Image: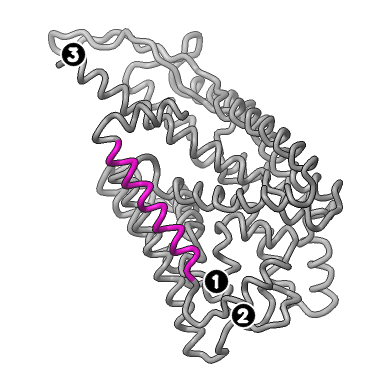
Amino acid sequence: MLTVFARAFRVPELRKKLLFTLGLIVLFRLGQIMPAPGVDVLAVRQCVGSASGGLFDMMQMLSGGAMLQLSVFALGVMPYITASIIMQLFAVLVPRLDALRKEGHNGQARITQYTRYLTVGLALLNATTIVAMARSGNLLPGCARPLLRDQGLLTVSVIVLTMVAGTCVVMWMGELVTDRGIGNGMSILMFTQVVAVFPGYMAKIFVLTPFGFAVMLASGLCLVAAVVFVEQAQRRVPVQYAKRMVGRRMYGGSSTYIPLKVNQAGIVPVIFTSSLLYLPSLAAPLLGAEAGAWVSRNLTAGTHPLYMSAYVLLIVSFAYFYVAITFNPVEVADNMRRFGGFVPGIRPGAPTARYLAYVLSRLTAPGAVYLGVLALLPLVAFAILRDPGTQQNFPFGGTSVLIMVGVGLDTVKQIESQLQQRNYEGFLR
C-alpha cells in the first residue's frame, strides 16, 4: 500500500488529488473537534471520559468521537449513509424510483437530489434527538453537570441548526472528494471517523495493561488479515459471448465472468442492525420505569445473550435481504441474452437466472455468517473480559474493521487503476 501511494505522489495529477483529499480530511476533523455554540466543553469532556458501555462506544466509533462531544460535525456521514441505503431500498420497491434508476445519468442525478433532501431530514431528526437527550441528561447518564450552558429554546435551536448545517457541509465535502479527489468521498470520511479514535483507544489500553495491548494488537492484525481474505474472495461465473454479424463486421466471441463476492452485502447489514438496536436505547426513557429498566438491561448491554442473539439474527437477515434487492438474477440473465451471452452448460433466459440465484444464495450464506461472527467478536470479548475500562477502550470491533479494510482496499484499487491508465497512455505516446 505504501508503494502504491509513493508511486501516486510521483504523478503530478494524482499528487494534486491526494493532497486535495488530505486537505478536506483535515477540515473534516477540525469540524468534528470544534464544539457547537452553547455547549459546555469542560462538562462534555469530563462526562465523556467517564462514560462506558456498548452504546457509547458505538456512537464514539461511528462519529469519530464527535457525537457525544456535540461538535459542529457531530452527526458526521451517518445521515447521508442512512439516506443512501434507504434510497437503494426504495429504488427497488417504488416503481417511479426504479424507472429513474434505469434512465441513466439524468435519473441518477434525480435520485441523488432526493438522497440529499432525505439526508437533511434525517440530520434534523438526529440532531433534535441528540440535543434533547443532552438537555434532559440522558445522553451521558451519570453526568452531574449540565452539558448545555443554557436550556432555553433559542440555544437548543441554534445547536440543532448548527449540526444540520454541519451535515450539509460534510455531504458537500464528500461529493468534492468524489469529484476532485481519490476514492468515494463519503467512504473516505467514514474511514477517517473510524481511524480517528484508534490512537486514543490503543494508548489507553497500553496504559492499563501492556501485555493486553500486545495480545490485542496481534489479534487485531490476524483479524484484519482474515477480513482482507474474505473481502477479496469471489465466485467467478464464466460467461461466453457468441459471435454475431452486424453489417460487415463480426462481434462477440469473447469470454468474461461475473464476479460474485462472498460478502456481497458489504457493511450495510451491520449499519442497519446497529441503527435498529440503537432505537430501544432511545425509547427506554419513554417506556416507564419497569419497561425501561428491562430494555436497558436486555437490549442495551452488549454482553447480554438476548442482545447478542438479536444482533446476529438481524445481521444475517439484512444480508440476505440486501443482496436480494441489489442483485437481480432475472435482469442479469436478460441482459446477457440480449447481447448474446450465456453461461457454459446453462441455457439462456430463465435457466440462467435460476442458476445465478442458486449460486448467489450459496455465497450469501457464508457471507452472512461471516458478518455475524465478525460483529459478535467484540461483544464476546466484552463478556469474557468483564473489565469496564478495557471494554470502553476495545478498538477492534467488527464494524470498524470492515470499514477500514473495505474502504482501504477500494481506495488502493482506484489509485492502482489510475496509475495503470497513465502507464498505458505513456506507452502509446
Distance between the alpha carbons at the discs numbered 2 and 3: 72 Å
Give the vertical position of 168 relative to 214 (above or below): below
* Image coords of residue 333 (percent x, y): 43, 25
Q: SS at mark 2?
A: loop
Where are the magenta residues, as a range? Answer: 15-34
Quick check: can you spot residue 194? yes
Please identify the dominant SS of the magenta region: helix
Q: Which residue is pictured at 66% across the width and 68% down the height?
A: 48
Q: Are marks 1 and 2 in contact (CB under 8 Å)?
A: yes
Question: Which label sits on residue 246?
Answer: 3
* Image coords of residue 203 (percent x, y): 67, 50
* Image coords of residue 303 (percent x, y): 82, 53
- Residue under pointer 1: 70
**Crowdedness near tag 3: few (<14), some (14–19) or many (≥20) residues, C-alpha within 10 Å:** few
Q: Earlier in the sequence, mark 2 or mark 3?
A: 2
- Residue under pointer 2: 147
The amino acid sitting under disc 3 is Val
The amino acid sitting under disc 1 is Leu
Distance between the alpha carbons at the discs numbered 1 and 2: 9 Å
